Structures are given as C-alpha cells and as structure tokens.
Amino acid sequence: MPLIPSIFVTIFDLYYFLSSRALCTAINNHVIILLRFLDLISKLTDFVWNIHYYRTGTALSSTSTFCLAWLFIDTTLFTSISILMAWAPIERHVIIFYPHLLAAKTKRFFFICSLHFTAVYTNDHLCCLCKRSAIFRSSDQLLC
C-alpha cells in the first residue's frame, strides 16, 4: 500500500512541472522532470514486479521475453536514474557559474553523447542475451 501514495505524489509533481510553461521550459528543471518520469515508470513496473516476486516466489510471467524485459527495465532505469542524479549537481553548477557553456553547439554535443550512451547500453543488453539466460536459472529451476 505505501506505493500508491508515492505514485500519486509523483504524478502530481509531473503535472506541476509540465502544466506551467515557465517551469517546463526552464533548463534547470529538465533533469528533475526526467527523474520524476523515470521514477514513475520504475514504480509502475519494476517495483510492482519485485513486490510480486518476493511475495509469491515466482515472476509475474515466466516467459523469457518478460524476464529479459524485466532485466532491461531494471538495469536501464537504475543506471539512468543514477547517472541523472550525478549529472544534476554538475548541471546546476554549470548553469550558475558558466552560463555561456549552454550554447546551442554544447547542448547538441551533450544530446549526442547521451544518445550514444543509450545506444551502447541497449546494444550491450540486447546482443548478449545468451550470457544472461543463466541468471534466471538456479539449480535447473527457472526463477523467472
């Protein structure tokens, strides 16, 4: 039950940031909006699946597609949120002390770097499925 109020607060936060044009377009709020969005996805998928797994001892669906999707969502969301949490204070520092670095070319560079990171990370997870299939087995019993 504690997850439900948290989902409502996250939705309220997103509505608050996205309903106001000034808050939505302010560059210092972009990381916060993205963090809240990823947090909402995590609460609606990964947390629910983990709670079900720990309560029943079985996955919500025992198909390999679901297990790989769960693994991908879990690791991608955790890594993305961690990187954004590390990036947020750096971005705030740049916004306050070096605002000239926020020119169009610099923004484009950061966007291309983030796309490259996402592509490499996705490729790593989707192309190495055979190595990860052993994660879901424990003494010849399918865990997921």
Image (cartoon, rainbow, N blue to C red):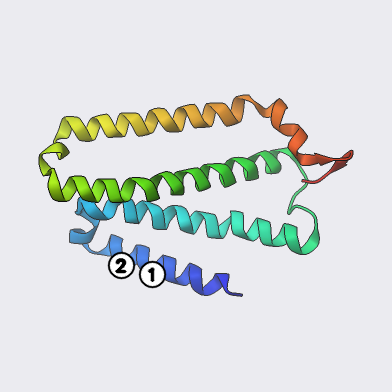
**Is 115 placed left or right of 125 in the picture?**
left
Element type at marker 2?
A: helix
Mark number for residue 12?
1
Mark number for residue 137?
none
Between 137 and 46, the one lying in front of the other is: 137
- Spot the residue most to the right: 140
- Residue 42 on image: x %, y %: 53, 55
Query: Label 2 amino acid?
Result: Tyr
Element type at marker 1?
A: helix
Q: Which class describes the residues within 10 Å of circle 2: few (<14), some (14-19), or many (20+)?
A: few
Do the CB atoms of the residues marked 2 and 1 lie less than 8 Å apart? yes
Q: Is residue 106 above or below residue 136?
A: above
- Residue 89 on image: x %, y %: 29, 51
The residue depicted at 75 percent of the width and 50 percent of the height is 61
The residue depicted at 70 percent of the width and 32 percent of the height is 132
Query: Label 1 amino acid?
Result: Phe
For the residues labelled 2 and 1, the Cα–Cα distance comes to 6 Å
Q: Which residue is mark 2?
A: 16
- Residue 60 on image: x %, y %: 73, 54
